[in-house]
Image (tube, helix red, strand yellow):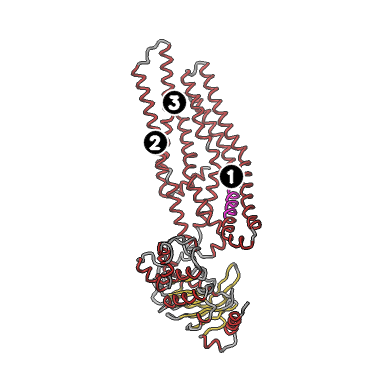
């Protein structure tokens, strides 16, 4: 249990000094909690003596006792407030920093990391898991550490009155700790199971929501809901089993504490009967017997929570310890933008996608990459942007191996327009400005006009301040594509990668997008993946990729006169375009 507490303290980073100060406040808070009980015993003793004829109880003593009680109440309020204001906000502060840190880490790891860890696991780590620590991390510090501080402080106070009663109280605390340790061992086994069930539930929920359009289209509501229903049922069954596992240990822990309270009261009564202890002190011991263990009783619920926090910290550490793809790279400013692949081999999950690929893209030229689906076209673009590192060979830009360049430095020089455009749940203005955060409103309008999207933006309810749905769901495919081109224009990078930018749009939108692309690519090094002849026939060179290899290269005029993949590719495209229903 205390190992878990130590991890939470370490997790708080430089704020752990505030935790230690909070522990001091907790000690004084406990002292001010115990003082009224001791004061009441002292006052009761005076009353009894006064009733026996000793006229020690005067109005001054009454006022003194009243003032003492007010002082202890104010003291308890003060130190309780100081402890809460010092410790309680730490969880929220650290969690906010951790989320930002994890975001920074995720953008620096290889995209392969996201294949190894499913979306539910990563989403759970950044949202649910961190929120759990945010809510319960500091609460566990308060319950466990401050709970034991309070209990031991009261035992210390008891020792001044009667050492044997203090020993009984200490024995109760230590014996209950044994059952807490057993509960902790059980929690060690159950916490990872609980986490796995939580991740599965989140993954199933995300998949269900993302696939809602398919579910509705094929009327498979019952089939699709089965997966999410099974995930929820599994989570419920696991949580019920965990609770049942904990019941015996929780009951034994509480039984020991209640038994210790009874023994304290019984021992105090025996001492009072035998004249070893006076009645006021006996009553004080009886009150302490209930107060002292109240701080410990709540700790049994903390054991399971702490182990879940442990499992959560393990998961977060696994993300934070992920290898940065550019950990050995440096910030390098490029001055030349020719791209060279030299004997590049790369694969996903031990399956080679590219094999011994070599080619050069001269600066300020346009290179089109064509080939059948799955041939490795998009992989080439992903490797240029260093979303992955090559398995063998090298890629250089301006004569510099991109492995020597940090991702931030490299991507400053690259703009990408994907077939599947993603827009953020934000204003149109901010989505375009994402390419250059410091850009002015005038700069955004200027590129929007060049990208042929200014007119339709102005027809939106709030123009550039219109908030578009998650992923740009409120816009058409062509509109999203033109906004993404405007975003790339604003970035104004010397290298532009167009990955099937016009593959799934209608002819009217395609014409507007082609016009926007023409404005985007002027005077830059261009890599285009496309299937349409109009897009590739004017390229300075065409690379034909098939089976993970570059099987042909040349201009359109050169390749059209050769028998091979390129001519066959164009013939198939022509046949497809002529086909009618």
Q: Which residues are magenta?
A: 191-202
Which residue is at 41% across, 24% downward?
39
CB within 8 Å, label 3 to label 1: no
Task: Provide residue 51's location: percent of width, then percent of height.
Answer: 42, 12
Of residues 207 and 394, which is closer to you in this image?
A: 207
Extreme residue toward the left, this view: 60
What whole-number distance in Å separates the C-alpha atoms at marks 3 and 2? 18 Å
Marks 2 and 1, how far apart at CA: 33 Å
Foreground tag (2 vs 1): 2
Alpha-carbon span between mark 3 and mark 1: 37 Å
Looking at the image, residue 301 lies above or below residue 377: above
Q: Are marks 3 and 2 in contact (CB under 8 Å)?
A: no
The answer to whether mark 2 and mark 1 are in CB contact below 8 A is no
Residue at (43% x, 19% y) in the render: 44
The disc at residue 79 is 2
Quadrant of the rendering where the C terminus is positioned: bottom right
Q: Which residue in the protein does label 3 denote? A: 37
Name the residue rendered at 40%, 42% in the picture: 86
What residue lies at 49% left-to-right and 39% top-to-bottom? Answer: 143
- Residue 560 appears in the figure: yes
Q: Is residue 460 above or below residue 518?
A: above
Which residue matches tag 1?
187
Q: Earlier in the sequence, mark 3 or mark 1?
A: 3
Q: Secondary structure at mark 3?
A: helix
Q: Position of residue 230 (x, y in %)?
A: 64, 52
């Amino acid at each position: 249990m205390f190992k878990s507490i130590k991890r939470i303290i370490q997790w708080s980073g430089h704020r752990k000094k505030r935790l230690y100060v909070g522990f001091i406040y907790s000690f004084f808070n406990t002292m001010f909690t115990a003082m009224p009980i001791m004061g009441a015993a002292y006052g009761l003793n005076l009353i009894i003596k006064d009733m026996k004829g000793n006229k020690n109880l005067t109005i001054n003593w009454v006022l003194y006792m009243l003032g003492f009680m007010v002082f202890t109440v104010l003291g308890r309020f003060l130190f309780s407030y100081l402890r809460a204001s010092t410790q309680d906000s730490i969880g929220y502060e650290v969690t906010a920093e951790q989320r930002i840190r994890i975001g920074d880490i995720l953008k620096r790891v290889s995209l392969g990391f996201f294949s190894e860890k499913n979306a539910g696991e990563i989403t759970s780590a950044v949202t649910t898991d961190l929120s759990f620590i945010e809510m319960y991390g500091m609460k566990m510090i308060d319950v466990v550490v401050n709970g034991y501080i309070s209990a031991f402080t009261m035992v210390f106070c008891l020792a001044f009155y009667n050492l044997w009663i203090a020993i009984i109280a200490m024995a109760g605390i230590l014996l209950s700790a044994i059952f807490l340790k057993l509960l902790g061992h059980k929690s060690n086994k159950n916490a990872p199971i609980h986490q796995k069930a939580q991740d599965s539930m989140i993954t199933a929920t995300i998949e269900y929501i993302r696939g809602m359009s398919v579910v509705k289209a094929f009327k498979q509501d019952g089939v699709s809901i089965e997966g999410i229903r099974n995930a929820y049922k599994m989570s419920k069954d696991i949580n019920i089993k965990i609770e049942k596992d904990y019941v015996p240990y929780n009951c034994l822990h509480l039984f020991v504490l209640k038994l210790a309270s009874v023994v304290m009261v019984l021992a105090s009564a025996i001492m009072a009967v035998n004249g070893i202890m006076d009645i006021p002190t006996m009553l004080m011991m009886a009150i302490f017997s209930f107060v002292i263990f109240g701080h410990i009783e709540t700790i049994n619920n903390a054991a399971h929570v702490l182990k879940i926090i442990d499992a959560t910290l393990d998961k977060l550490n696994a993300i934070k310890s992920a290898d940065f793809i550019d950990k050995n790279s440096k910030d390098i400013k490029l001055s030349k933008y020719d791209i060279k692949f030299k004997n590049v081999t790369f694969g996903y999950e031990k399956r080679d996608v590219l094999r011994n690929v070599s080619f050069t893209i001269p600066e300020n030229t346009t290179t089109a990459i064509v080939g059948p689906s799955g041939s490795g076209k998009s992989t080439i673009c992903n490797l240029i942007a260093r979303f992955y590192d090559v398995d063998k060979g090298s890629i250089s830009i301006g004569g510099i191996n991109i492995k020597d360049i940090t991702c931030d430095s490299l991507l400053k020089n690259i703009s990408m327009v994907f077939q599947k455009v993603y827009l953020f749940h934000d204003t149109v203005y901010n989505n375009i400005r994402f390419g250059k955060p410091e850009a002015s409103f005038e700069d955004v309008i200027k590129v929007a006009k060049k990208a042929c999207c200014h007119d339709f933006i102005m027809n939106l309810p709030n123009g550039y301040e219109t908030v578009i749905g998650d992923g740009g769901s409120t816009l058409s495919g062509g509109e999203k594509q033109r906004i993404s081109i405007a975003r790339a224009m604003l970035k104004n990078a010397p290298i532009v990668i167009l990955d099937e930018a016009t593959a799934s749009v209608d002819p009217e939108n395609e014409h507007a997008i082609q016009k926007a692309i023409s404005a985007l690519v002027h005077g830059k090094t261009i890599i285009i993946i496309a299937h349409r002849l109009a897009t590739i026939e004017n390229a300075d060179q065409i690379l034909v990729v098939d089976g993970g290899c570059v099987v042909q290269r040349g201009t359109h005029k050169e390749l059209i006169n050769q028998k091979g993949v390129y001519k066959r590719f164009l013939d198939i495209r022509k046949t497809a375009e002529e086909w009618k229903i």
